[in-house]
Image (cartoon, rainbow, N blue to C red):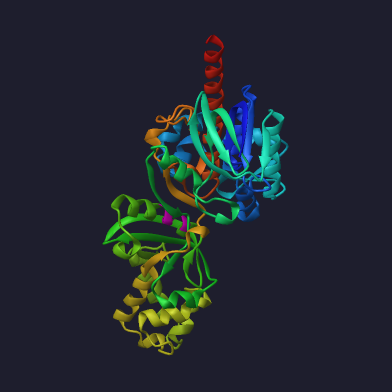
Amino acid sequence: MKKTDVMTDVIVIGAGAAGLLAAGRAAAQGAQVLLLEQNEKPGRKIGITGKGRCNVTNACDARTFQEHIVTNGRFLFSALHRLGPAEMMALLEEAGVPLKVERGNRVFPVSDRAFDVIDGLVRYAKRNGARLRTGVTVRRIQPAAGGWQVVTDQEVLTARAVIAATGGQSYASTGAHGDGYRWAGALGHTVQACRPALIPFTVKEKWAAEMMGLSLKNIAIRIEVGGKKVCEEFGEMLFTHFGVSGPVILSASSYLQRYLREQGRSFAEAAPVLHLDLKPALSPEELDERLVRELEAAPAKNYRNLLTALLPQKMIGVMVKLTGIPGDKKAADIRREERLRLREQLKNMTMTLSGTRPADEAVITMGGVAVNEVDPKTMESRLCPGLFWAGEVLDVDALTGGFNLQIAFSTGYAAGEGAAAYAEQIKQEEAMQ
């Protein structure tokens, strides 16, 4: 295998969101930067985010941003202060990517094209002087005299500093195979257990599949394990052929996965229960009053037909089944205990969560390099001088809405600054010898 003797200041591994920012920022600080990407084109995962539109960040204030971080929010204070949503938006605009803000402060390119974001990030890196090489698979990284060796499938490269921005394990088709976790473990880092996050759930109940394709808005969910509340969410959800998905489900999955990780329990052991409130704006008493009015207003109407005023069409057959009230029963004949059964189902429809979809369908990976072993200001390893971590490979994650991409940008930016400063310090020490 060919060995390159020329020492580069900084090698960045992975040309995703974190890697592109890291390479661009390190180069802007005057470092000689080589960015390596195993795919033939950079930013493949960016290209599929936001259904191809790319929700680049969230234009909210710092407090709101922190509220949307699920794991290790305190670790991110410094990085987000250095490059927050406003700074990231300005960076992209300067790189030729006009932006717009939509519902929930979600930021998208005006073109609605994720590939325009990729092009802008590549321009940012290259204009600052970073060199990009694609189609390069890194096998391992290892300490060497005066810096680090990066062993690829073609050659051995050397650098004063290395930034690993290799991503997680979600969307393996984009090249995310968890390489960074293996390298971290081999170098003595603690790697927190990885679980798929922001991922749909499968459910035990067969009737859920009868509502496949049904999208619900303004509903509330609660997930409990052994009667203990793990999380609550309000918004939109979707029934699928395998179970449930949609924004509130994806968010809830992150909180549940963190809880299960902390408890050291599997889905099978925990048997989480999803509680669905179809009428969260009404208290049980207010809903009961409404049901009484509906029944009294149309005494000759069939129960199934009465439900059309309360539920989407796809849900009516399931509700008839769950309440045990005959669909052709007249409103005037529905007893109080039957009405209360209907109220209970409207306020507390329950499903047993049996697991998640395959990890490859997760938006992100929860877990990764333990943050107590990483300097939060520079992203430098506390165990391996000259090695920096950025992006999803770290044990940090957030909810949907542009937060995870911003975390990747912020940690990449910090790592770029840190690695450039480290490389400069090493060069000065070399000059004095």
Say which quarter of the image contains residue 374: top left
In the image shown, does 217 or 335 lie closer to the viewer?
A: 217
Q: Please state the horizontal and vertical placement of residue 113, each as a whole percent of the image.
A: 70, 50
Identity of the residue drawn at 60% across and 50% down: 45
Task: Left or right? Give the position of 203 relative to 341.
Answer: right
Q: Is residue 433 magenta?
A: no
Q: Is residue 251 magenta?
A: yes
In the image shown, does 52 or 315 lie closer to the viewer?
A: 52
Identity of the residue drawn at 68% across and 28% down: 128
Q: Is residue 255 visible?
A: yes
Above or below residue 254? Residue 158 is above
Say which quarter of the image contains residue 340: bottom left
Q: Bounds of the magenta span?
A: 250-254
Q: Please state the horizontal and vertical placement of residue 322, each as a whole percent of the image.
A: 38, 79
Quadrant of image for the N terminus: top right
Task: Left or right? Give the position of 198 relative to 10.
Answer: left
Q: Is residue 22 visible?
A: no
